[in-house]
Image: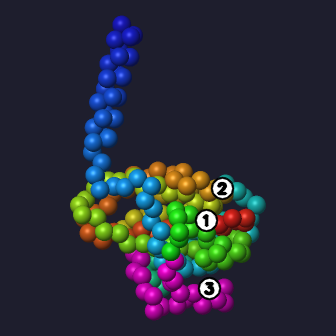
Amino acid sequence: MKSKILFSYLILLIILFNEINYAQNKSIVINEWLTNWDLIGPFQLDKSLDNINHLSKFEKDFLEEFGGENNFQLDFNKEIISNGEKLKWSKFVSKDSIINLDDAISKKSYITAYAYKEIIFEENGTYIFALGTNDGGKLWINDIEVWDYQSGRGLKPDENLIPVFFKKGKNKILLKIEERGNNWE
């Protein structure tokens, strides 16, 4: 009896995984990453030895002058002052899937920055958004927070696989990444 139940579960799993496999959009290309981003930072955070929670001030919305994290509107002409420094959005192109924020933004520790990207989809659909950060971060898709990782860590590309709904047409991706020390990616 147990073997029949186990066999039934295995058949059901095979059918489910087979359907998931065929449900993917055929235009998705494996190992193709988003390499062009708009970046702004650094924004100063408080120093902390807590490696489990976000650094103090990470929850602050540094993008209020751009509509805020939940209603973001990119404006390359606007500059903001953070910690006595004038900051503007800049375009950044990475040669591979890893964006070295030490080179692109700052080599300082206990800071955060934002990366922004707009992408176009031919139709509505749910996709897996693969993401890795060094250290913690947050992700918004079309002004909705869909991911929050609080701890410090080293980068492992595609460590987080996040199911995300993208609508037909333009979609907004906003990523906030904190830096505790060492590499920032």
Q: Is residue 176 left or right of residue 146?
A: right
Residue 177 appears in the figure: no
Instruction: Verify whether residue 178 appears in magenta.
Output: no
Which residue appears at 60% of the width and 76% of the height?
104
Query: Quick one: label 1, few (<14), some, or many (20+) residues within 10 Å?
Result: many
Q: Residue 143 location in percent, x, y? A: 39, 69
SS at mark 2 in the image: loop
- Compared to 183, does 10 lie above or below? above
State which quarter of the image contains the C terminus.
bottom right
Instruction: Tell me residue 14's x, y (percent).
Output: 33, 28
Give the labeled residue for mark 3.
82
Cα distance between the residues tagged 2 and 3 = 26 Å
Nearer-the-camera pick, 15 or 96:
96
Nearest to N terminus: mark 2 or mark 1: 2
Task: Please tell me whether mark 2 or mark 1 is closer to you in this view.
Answer: 1
| Residue interval drawn in magenta | 69-92
Residue with the mark numbered 2: 153
Q: Mark 2 and mark 1: span between their CA atoms?
A: 10 Å
Residue 77 highlighted magenta (yes or no): yes
Tell me which residue sits at (49%, 81%) in the image.
Answer: 91
**Amino acid type indicated by mark 2:** Arg
CB within 8 Å, label 3 to label 1 = no
Looking at the picture, how far across and down is residue 89, in whole percent? 51, 84
Name the residue tied to disc 1. Answer: 185
Amino acid bearing label 3: Ser
